[in-house]
Amino acid sequence: MHDDDQNDELIGRVADELRIPVALDPGFDARVMAAVRRATPGRWRRALRWWTEPRPLRVSPLTGLACAAGVAALLVVGAVSLRPSLPSPIKGAVAVGAAVPAEPGSEMVQFVLVAPQASSVAVVGDFNDWDPSRTPLRAEAAGGVWSANVSLRSGQHQYAFVVDGKEWRPDPAAPRAVTDDFGSPNSVIVVGGKST
Amino acid sequence: MTDRSDPALIRQVLDGNPDAYGALVARYRERYARFAVHMLGEREDAEEALQDAFLRAYRSLAQCADPARFDAWLFRILANRCRTAGARRARRSRTFVRDEIALGEASAEHPAERREWREEIHRALGRLEADQREAFLLKHVEDLSYEEMSALTGAGISALKMRVKRACERLRVMLGEVQHA
């Protein structure tokens, strides 16, 4: 391109003069680099930024497909392996069978109550003369779960829980008794498949 | 042999070595200082704008889309800084460079007439409109094509040509008067 101004001798002389390098303050580089270092985050901040800042990822379609398949496989394996370990619902009174020894003609039964606010829990029933002092429940390590193992003769038994020495509660996980001998509902458990 | 290209240095900086940026500062400071001084007319203002441009570029280095064109990217940042600095303050009455070092060197190498001529050039340059001064410097001092100037300034090519033409006309008038005085 040959503009008129490019051939201008005066403009050429002006440009030549303006092309002469300009001297900078000798400390310019040091000042810039000091500002650069101040603006540089420390190692931990850089590490945090690496994890928290969004960044574009370049992934080929094939790699993306392989990653998606891997994630799907992990989900399937995880679902299958987790299923047997799901906690079973807490039952109020359950026969624990041969795992715990019991007297002949009897069966060991575990009484369980969830009472996070309670400071003491006992089970009372026809098997202990409805005496709150005879069968206290023990608090589990966490979760407010109280439990006790009791050897019960085969047959049907009525029972209830006594919370903090005064509050009678039926077992929320067991059927209720038809009759209520003490003015509050009781629960029923059948041991060994025979009713008394 | 260590790779000292712009992309290699930028890679080092982004990998956590801020000192590698010093090589980029040293590589481009003089060329861009010249532009900033001619745009702003004062060495202190120019150094401030240049330092600001280097720092802004450093902070945004990860966003430099084409590290091989770091120089053009930095130049665009600097041109913006000069525009902002120029618009922010009223231009001082003495618009030529009061750079004792540069003028000292000039006086040692050139006769007194040459020094006066240089001061007149800077005075005339300072009287141009900022966009005309910018277009003139980019075209005739930095030797950019109109396409490069358009990419750098965001202005259209025909508008840039007009600015250069007007700048040349005004410089001819102002400096022609000096020469014939």
Image: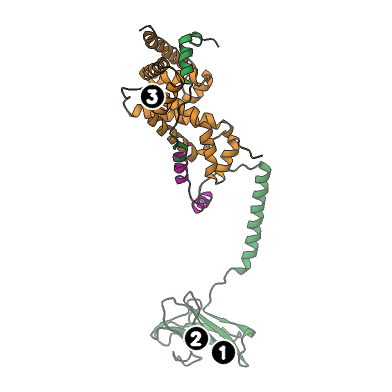
The residue labelled by disc 3 is B97
The residue labelled by disc 1 is A151
Callout 1: few (<14), some (14-19), or many (20+) C-alpha neighbours within 10 Å?
A: some
Label 3 amino acid? Val
Which of discs 2 and 3 lies nearer the camera? The answer is 3
Magenta stretch: helix, strand or loop mostly: helix
Vertical arrangement, residue B145 with respect to residue A118, above or below: above
Question: Left or right: B72 with respect to B92?
Answer: right
Callout 3: few (<14), some (14-19), or many (20+) C-alpha neighbours within 10 Å?
A: many
Q: Residue A158 carries which label?
A: 2
Label 2 amino acid? Gln
Which region shows up in magenta? A31-50
Vertical arrangement, residue A161 with respect to residue A20, above or below: below
Give residue B93's position: percent from left, percent from top: 31, 22
Q: Which element is circle 2 on?
A: strand
Vertical arrangement, residue B15 with respect to residue A148, above or below: above
Chain letter of disc 2? A
Q: Say whether disc 1 or disc 2 marks the residue closer to the N-terminus.
A: 1
